[in-house]
Every structure is written in structure tokens, then in C-alpha cells.
Amino acid sequence: MKIRLEVEDGICEDEIIIRCKQITGQIQKLQKLISEESAEASMMTFYKENQEFYFPLKNILFFETSESYVYAHTRNDTFRIKFRLYELENFLPRVFVRISKSTIVNVKQILIVSRNLTSSSLI
């Protein structure tokens, strides 16, 4: 397999093209990896008070429901979003996993899982 990068000034958007004789398992994995990486970097609208914020999904630690809203948590802040958890499940990249009825976590942000005597876990 050859890999070639071309850098061009003046293009509006980055583009990745995969040329192949046939679609093999390796090509499918490569396409999936690129798609997931692209999805993680995609932006979403977050709300706090009367302001809108835009930043990549990879900055999100977890989403949770509280009362009748869904919140996105980063390392330093919490933002409200205008989606339900089941809607998020349909378009978030695979690094986001629903771990309970009220929580979706970013598995790339998990540093440690602690288990206690009652078999529950703390992430």
C-alpha cells in the first residue's frame, strides 16, 4: 500500500481519497478509522446561560440527563445541549458509549475504573 500526501494552498476543505483495486478488510478499517476521527473532531453547539459555544466532541468527558435536560461535561465546565440521549447515540462517534439510562461517556477520556464491594463502578 502506498500513502501519498499532497499539500495545496487555496483549497477550501481537506479531502481524503482512497484508491484501491478492491475493498479489502484493511481498506474498510482505514475508512472507518478516518471517519471516526473526523466525527470526533466535528463540532456541536453547547449552551450556557444566554451564550452558544462550539468546540470538538473530543473535549467532552460525558453526557448526562438531569431533570428534563441533557448536559455535556468537559474538564472545567458543564453545558446544556438540545438533544436527548437516544438522539446522541445515533450520531456520536463510537468512542461515546451509553453506560446507563442517563449517561453516555467518552471512553477515550476514562483514566481509571474503580469497583466497590457492591459491584458498582466509579469512572
Image (cartoon, grey):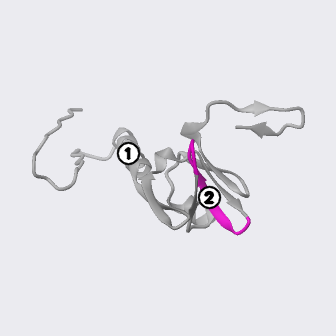
95 vs 21, nearest the viewer: 95
Residue 43 percent location from the top left of the image: 41, 56
Look at the numbered disc 2 and give the secondary structure of its residue. strand
* Mark seen at residue 2: none
Label disc, if present, on residue 28 of the rendered structure: 1
- Determine the image quadrant of residue 3: top left
Residue visible at 17% across and 37% down in the picture: 5
Judge by depth and name the residue closer to the eye, 90 or 46.
Answer: 46
Position of residue 75 measured from the top left corner of the image (x, y, whole percent)? 57, 42
Residue type, label 1: Gln
The structure residue drawn at horizontal position 85% and vertical position 37%, both measured from the top left corner, is: 119
Crowd rating for badge 2 (residues with CA inside 10 Å; few <14, some 14–19, many 20+): many
**Split into 4 quadrants, where in the image is the C terminus?**
top right
- Is the Cβ of the residue at disc 2 closer than 8 Å to that at disc 1? no
Q: Nearer the viewer, mark 2 or mark 1?
A: 2
25 in relation to 101, above or below: above
Q: How packed is label 1: few (under 14 Cα within 10 Å), some, or many (20 or more)?
A: few
Give whichever of discs 2 and 1 has the lower sequence position.
Answer: 1
Asked whether, in this view, residue 76 is left or right of residue 51, the answer is right
Q: Is residue 37 left or right of residue 104?
A: left
In the picture, the disc for residue 71 is 2
Location of residue 81 by image quarter: bottom right
**Picture coordinates of residue 93, whole percent (x, y):** 49, 51
Q: How far across and how far down the image is residue 64, in percent?
A: 66, 56
Q: Residue at x 56, y 46 (%)?
A: 74
**Residues in magenta, as a range:** 67-77
121 relative to 82 in the view: left or right? right
